[in-house]
Amino acid sequence: MNKLQIVKPEDIEKRSMEIITSELNGRTWPEPQFSIIKRCIHTSADFEYADNLCFSKGAAEIGIKALRNGASIVTDTEMAAAGINKKKMEEYGGKIYCFMRDADVAEESVKRGCTRATVCMEKGADIRGEVIFAVGNAPTALVRLYELIQIGLKPTLIIGAPVGFVNVVEAKELIMETNIPYIVPKGRKGGSNIAATICNAMLYYKG
Amino acid sequence: MNKLQIVKPEDIEKRSMEIITSELNGRTWPEPQFSIIKRCIHTSADFEYADNLCFSKGAAEIGIKALRNGASIVTDTEMAAAGINKKKMEEYGGKIYCFMRDADVAEESVKRGCTRATVCMEKGADIRGEVIFAVGNAPTALVRLYELIQIGLKPTLIIGAPVGFVNVVEAKELIMETNIPYIVPKGRKGGSNIAATICNAMLYYKG
């Protein structure tokens, strides 16, 4: 047991961030991007996020401002919805939506032969006010968002972080071709944990 | 849009598993470990899980059998709880417990100056019948489990998958020193997604 460091619960995150900063060997990014990058590494212990996270110009600032103004978050995974800090969202007046388990979504997706995530994004597109889409699972969610953007949808920000092997890379690239603000871990990596973490990094940001 | 492969929703997972198997370049493991390894890679797009996942002898078989017999799962993260397949668990008669948001857990952890995860594991230790602990966040949860095992706790299986930089490596090693069956991604990596995925891989396993 004596190999364990004695660190108070409230100091663990601080100490972790110091280790991450130190292992980045002096690499640094402007804020608030740097905070988001560090939190993605903190959540995954994967330093690849230092290289793969792409931000459109001002995307992080736009997301932070929108969340403080009570923007909603729509996500394609229950895990991401569970991971986003509800207390902070409530404080700012924002809501978190995930429609993946809705009966009408299941029904519609079977009828149309599409994924449930596709239908979820359509439901999300009907939400009024500022909306951040945080995609942590399905590339088809990003493809549907791309199509909706072509016909006029203007989400505040897209966090495009599906993970996987089929159409993930391509779907992320589609989103990066639009003029909608985005935060995207390029390549195959991402996931519900990363989508939630990016939201939380913006919610926690002080500055 | 024409870079996207046309894959039916129901075929995406199958195609992903084929890609993973192919990129493992002929590396293979006995089942059911192989299914668990592939699903961890599927969830993270991180092939490091092929190298870091450690199974005590028969651990995967023990977990699968226990789940089929209605074992409970106790986890230290709401995200993992949200990610574990509820339908499958219900089918087998098992329950998923996460006590992290319980008021008494918060109160007790403040009083004792420990993490909420520590108190959660103690609550989990009181559950009757077969219990699988799926730790996806807090190394302190593993440390508390280790201590409880020293005084007689005998969980069916420990999925030791916290992620991070402070005491994570050491806490995993502690669990691997016990005689309790374990599945552990050695090193810093892990997370709620990995803890949930290991549970799901066991729930989905056919064989």
Image (cartoon, coloured by chain):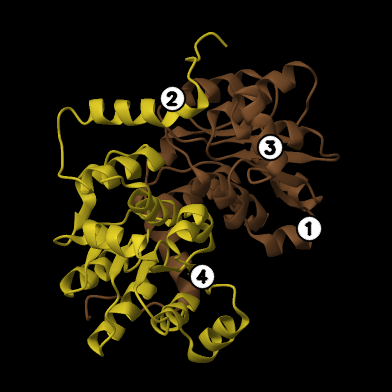
Chain colours: A brown, B yellow
- Residue B169 position within the rendered picture, expressed as x and y whole percent measured from the top left: 27, 63
Q: Which residue is mark 3?
A: A105
Q: Residue at x 25, y 60 (%)?
A: B183
Badge 4 local density, few (<14 within 10 Å), some, or many (20+)? many
> Do callouts 2 and 3 mark residues in contact (Cβ within 8 Å)?
no
**Foreground pick, B6 / A95:** B6
Q: Is residue A164 above or below residue A78?
A: above
Q: CA distance from mark 2 to mark 1?
A: 36 Å
Q: CA distance from mark 3 to mark 4?
A: 27 Å
- Residue A29 position within the rendered picture, expressed as x and y whole percent measured from the top left: 51, 41
- Residue A177 position within the rendered picture, expressed as x and y whole percent measured from the top left: 61, 18
- Secondary element type, mark 1: helix
Q: Residue at x 82, y 34 (%)?
A: A126
Badge 1 local density, few (<14 within 10 Å), some, or many (20+)? some
- Secondary element type, mark 2: loop
Of discs 3 and 4, which sits in the foreground?
3
Q: Residue at x 51, y 27 (%)?
A: B9
Q: Is residue A207 above or below residue A168?
A: below
Q: Is residue B205 above or below residue B152?
A: above
